[in-house]
Image (tube, rainbow, N blue to C red):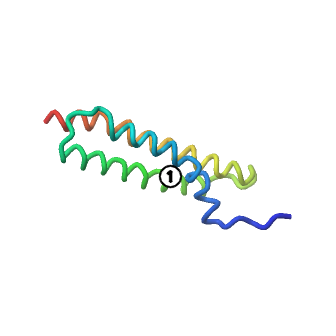
Amino acid sequence: MQPAMNPTIEIGLSFILFLPWFAILGALYWLFPRQPRHLKRKLFDLAVLVLSIVLSIAGMRWGYAIANPASGAIWKQVLAMLVAYGVFLAVLTVAVPLRRWSMRR
């Protein structure tokens, strides 16, 4: 029988595995469209990316907490990651038209 995994690592494992994909999506959000590129836009984009990561981590922890333990350890991580990914995409999806609208003003 294998020893149990550290709970902190177990909760964050799926997030760590998805981190490169979050980085790619975050970079695409940051880089496109290329213009205008002023301070207001940079601050807005930075705030959105920080918010998306913070809410993703909160969603991941919530998904892990509500997962049915009878389903197995891997499914707790799968649910946690699906929630985190959904939250990350939801924040970026809302931010794109909001950024466009705020930059026109």
Q: In the image, is residue 103 above or below residue 49?
A: above
- As helix, strand or loop, the secondary structure at mark 1 comes to helix
**On the picture, is 34 further left or further right than 73?**
left
**Which residue is at the far left?**
105
Question: Residue 17: image x %, image y %?
Answer: 59, 49
The image quarter in which residue 2 lies: bottom right
Quarter of the picture containing the C terminus is top left
**On the picture, is 9 further left or further right than 39?**
right
Q: Residue at x 64, y 51 (%)?
A: 77
Q: In the image, is residue 58 above or below residue 35?
A: below
Q: In the image, is residue 82 above or below residue 15?
A: above
Quarter of the picture containing the N terminus is bottom right
Q: Which residue is mark 1?
A: 59
Question: Residue 20: image x %, image y %?
Answer: 52, 46
The image quarter in which residue 37 lies: top left
Q: Amino acid at mark 1?
A: Gly
Q: Residue at x 75, y 66 (%)?
A: 4
**Which residue is at the far right?**
1
Tell me if mark 1 has few (under 14), some (14-19) or many (20+) residues whose alpha carbon lies within 10 angstroms of its own.
Answer: many
Count of numbered circles on the image:
1
Q: Residue at x 18, y 37 (%)?
A: 103
Question: Residue 76: image x %, image y %?
Answer: 66, 52
Question: Residue 99: image x %, image y %?
Answer: 26, 38
